[in-house]
Image: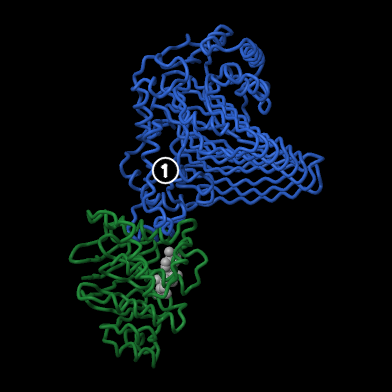
Amino acid sequence: MPAVQDTIDRVRKIDVDQYKYGFQTEIAMDKAPKGLSEDIIRFISAKKDEPSWMLEWRLEAYRRWLTLDEPTWARVHYPKIDFQDIYFYAAPKSTPGPTSLSDVDPELLKVYEKLGIPLREQEILAGVQKTDASELEEVSDNVYKSGRVAVDAVFDSVSVVTTFKKELAQAGVIFCSISEAIREHPELVKKYLGSVVPTSDNYYATLNSAVFTDGSFVFVPKGVRCPMELSTYFRMNEKNTGQFERTLIIAEEGAYVSYLEGCTAPQRDENQLHAAVVELVALDDAEIKYSTVQNWYPGDAEGKGGIYNFVTKRGDCRGDRSKISWTQVETGSAITWKYPSCILRGDDSSGEFYSIAVSNGYQQVDSGTKMIHLGKNTSSRIISKGIAAGFSQNTYRGQVSAHRKATNARNFTNCDSLLIGDQCGAHTVPYMEAKNSTAQFEHEATTSKISEDQKFYVMQRGIPEEEAIALIVNGFVKDVIQQLPMEFAVEAQKLIGISLEGSVG
Amino acid sequence: MLEIRNLHARIVDDGTEIIRGLNLTVKAGEVAAIMGPNGSGKSTLSYILAGREDYEVTEGDILYNGQSILEMDPAERATSGIFLAFQYPMEIPGVATMEFLKVAMNEQRKARGEEPLKIPEFLKRVKEAAASLSMDMAMLKRPLNVGFSGGEKKRAEILQMKLLEPKLCVLDETDSGLDIDALKIVSDGVNALRAPDRAFLVITHYQRLLEHIVPDSVHVLYRGQVIKSGDKSLALDLEANGYAGVIGEAA
Ligand SMILES: Nc1ncnc2c1ncn2[C@@H]1O[C@H](COP(=O)(O)OP(=O)(O)O)[C@@H](O)[C@H]1O
Ligand SMILES: [Mg+2]
């Protein structure tokens, strides 16, 4: 079934502000007491059986965090967060650490099943259906080519299972939870953790460094092309619990990896905090493709509840000719504060940022990227598509800078915003700075409203209004959708349709 | 099949009345030509039939198979069998023509309680229809109407009409922008669709199109009213003598 049709089916099945992933699961949980203190950090570190250097690292970050103030420059508004009212650690009781699939609580497996996330390797292997892909290709470029995907599933504060580990290990690829990596591969973690986003980076990154609970670790050694897509699914289940994801991906010389993260959370009246740090390191000739499909609970139609998504994501193109590409589809969260960035340190390195940010209801999105050109002949490309509906505010904030020594830095930026209705807002805040006269920066930006002419034309073919809007919007974001791994492009299109549900009255 | 009774309609934005007491009846199986000088309200009439919200009907009614359609939205009218081939088809960036066709066909099937088409069947239909209009399949992978020439857009409209199998087909100046070969192909396409249970409203400026699509009736629209009706000889008369005579007569 082509994606758009599917989108429409899905949209139809859902009532206004019925968040599909909004169910919650009763699972016995092991929790730290509420609030934040050095003791809580010691508790987390002990739960994870961490070496003492890790605990020291955390405590140092915590002491620094105590001296910082929350940033206020983003175009987002929310009441002050009471950090003493949050649980910083919650883990399903039956899962003391990553285990094999057979040890995982069946209730938990059910959660992931419900979310449509494949955890059973056997089923994934058996279930590959290459139906009429070649015929579909004639209909659409977005062919759903089922491939194999290794999954790390993170439930609240811990990784519950990682699939395909053995097969990946044979290729030399390490894919495990960050907690396991700290225990099993301390030399790698020590070398790279905090080397892209230092503990002192910003308020939320510093907080994350102190209290991070779980996330994924990927190491692709020299010359290896990772044999399958890697992905992590984050699920926030517990009430009043923060999720502090920490992910670290390293691609050595000439290595390649494509990684995707997906996120969902139950529907709750209270706001919940997700403060993540993701660090990518690409050495000479390495390439990392990082995709996000973010669908945290956005809050209800009146703006009650939803996730605060305060995220620091940064990639370091440390080696020459290295490449880092961020692709994000942001449909969820009450507030998104997120700027996946690239430091183009190596000569001839390149960075890309492809983004779709959809906001509806009372959602607030302030997202964009930073491309920091340090090496010679570095290039970057930014394609941002913002779609604002309802009463939402959608801001693109971007920074492109060329260092004095960055000769021949090139950037192309294209920011398009689409407004649905007249109660929402779209804003573009680009910032460009070239300290080297050879830099070539190009910037294009458009803001448009969904055209009545287009809508009428599409509806005249028998396509109902909401489906017509979903179709036009999916056309608007096509350039970015094409950047996603095939397996996720279809899912992303569906999500966009669902997120715009109720956007027309 | 279509009965327009004393229709009055105005532009919502500024209240200008464009359709001023229009009467028109079209029977099933009939091909009715609507002619008239520029600005007389032909396109507006086609939009109102299709349910465009920029116009407000202030008086009169439009009956389709005996039922008023004024309360139906454009998608509902389309699903009930009303198709409009636009004078200026819209571009839909990023949406492949093929994908658009599939969504439209399946939406209409769904509304009729039918299963979506299987991909091979869908492709078969599209390939046949495209071939009959001398359209290249490669073009159908491109976003709908984006960068299409005037003639290609018109063909794409007829392609959609063929595939959606409507009952009331409104063609708004489908001949404009077509060279003589394309005009022949498009007319053949329309003629092939003529059927006892299908009616056509062919809006045109020129007799030229009516040589290919021979109408059963011809109606002259002027200042939002049908001022004269006749058979196909009326079109020839207009071609020879212009609208002035007819307009003078009516005045
Ligand atoms: N949405 C609109 N806004 C302003 N004027 C309009 C609108 N629609 C139609 N008109 C005016 O109504 C008249 C009839 O237009 P139209 O139906 O396009 O004529 P035709 O198709 O016969 O050439 C013209 O004077 C046109 O400018
Ligand atoms: Mg016209």
Residue at the image point whose x is 37% and y is 29% from the top? A22
Q: Residue at x 35, y 48 (%)?
A: A8
* Label 1 environment density (alpha carbons within 10 Å; few <14, some 14–19, many ≥20): many
Query: How many marks do you count on the picture?
Result: 1
Quick check: A230 left or right of A69? left
- Write down the quadrant of residue A296 in the picture: top left
Label 1: element kind: loop
Above or below, comparing residue B112 to residue B187 in the picture? above
Ligand 2 visible in quadrant: bottom left
Q: Furthest residue to the left? A: B66
Residue A233 lies, in percent from the top left, at: 46, 30
Taking depth in this image into account, of A133 and A313 the one nearest to the observer is: A133
Identify by letter the chain in blue.
A
Quarter of the figure that contains the C terminus of chain A: top left
Q: Which residue is mark 1?
A: A500
**The chain coloured green carries which letter?**
B
**Quarter occupied by residue A306:** top left
Percent position of residue A405, x then y:
82, 40
Residue lying at the far top in this picture: please name it: A39
Nearer the observer, A250 or A71: A250
Q: Is A344 on the left or on the right of A211, as rendered?
A: right
Residue B221 percent location from the top left of the image = 34, 78
The chain ID associated with circle 1 is A
Q: Which kind of residue does numbered mark 1 sit on?
A: Leu
